[in-house]
Image (cartoon, rainbow, N blue to C red):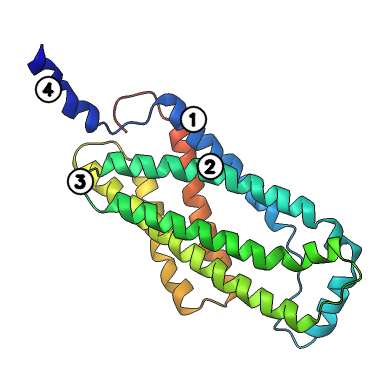
Amino acid sequence: MTSGLIRAHPAAMTSTDLGRGARLTTGIAGLVGVVVLGYFITFATLPDVTASDAPGAITAWLADPATASTALTALAVGALSYVLLLVFLGGIRRLVGMWDPDGIWPSVTGLALVLFLAGALVSDAFAWAVPLTRRTAPAMTVPPELVALLDRGWLVALVEAQLALGVAIGAATMAGLAARRRGVQVPRIVLGLGAVAAFAVVPLILMPDTSAVFLATNQLRLLWIVAVSIWLVARPGARTL
């Protein structure tokens, strides 16, 4: 009996499978989180602070009643997206730990996800500080220069967050490749999208303040989240991935 228990222990420790409930929870949270995040982005209406007419455009934006009235709604939607993505990313971290239990990739993934969430939170603080101030203290004067400064802080934090997410995706992809070499059924499309999304951090590093680069690379990371989420939800309840 004792020898049987000893033999059973390593098998439990080396499982490469999330339970069906965990897969559904992780996948659904990822899909809904992306939808909510897309809706959240629509609240960002600040004009381009680098344009020649930026001071006047910012002043008009500050005077617009919608800037203040939608701030609290935007904050609530953003908070919901964080809750959903926390569940998704927690499931991904667990999955990477199962794929590569003896390697460095689970630790890299975990650290990168912490940095991603920290950067995303800081970027939101920069983005919504002024609208929330306008909502709670409408008589307060906010100079356009301060708005522009906060916007650049938002950009720095957001770019760093996306770089961290790219590293996390790259680490998860490396763990998936290691698992696939051991016979675990990780779809090639998930690994391929992960590799592309990870390498997409290179142009983001070289051109961090170029909107087109940020938008294009961000779509790749979101596409990876969607692909992984669909796979987790649709995958049969087998013992291996």
Q: CA distance from mark 3 to mark 4?
A: 19 Å
Residue at the left extreme of this rendering: 3
* In this view, the mark in front (2 or 3): 3
* In this view, the mark in front (2 or 4): 4
In the rendered structure, the answer to whether residue 87 lies left or right of residue 14 reads right
- Kindly state the secondary structure of the residue where label 1 is placed: helix
Which residue position holds label 1?
24
Q: CA distance from mark 1 to mark 2?
A: 10 Å
Q: CA distance from mark 4 to mark 1?
A: 30 Å
Q: Which comes before the other along the chain, label 1 or label 3?
A: 1
In the rendered structure, the answer to whether residue 82 lies left or right of residue 97 reads right
Q: CA distance from mark 1 to mark 3?
A: 26 Å
In the rendered structure, the answer to whether residue 105 lies left or right of residue 126 reads left
Q: What amino acid does circle 3 point to?
A: Asp
Q: Position of residue 27 (x, y in %)?
A: 50, 36
Which residue position holds label 3?
102
Q: Which comes before the other along the chain, label 4 or label 1?
A: 4
**Considering the image in quadrants, where does the N terminus appear?**
top left
Which residue position holds label 4?
7
Q: Residues within 10 Å of mark 4 (few under 14, many from 20)?
A: few
Q: Which mark is residue 30?
A: 2
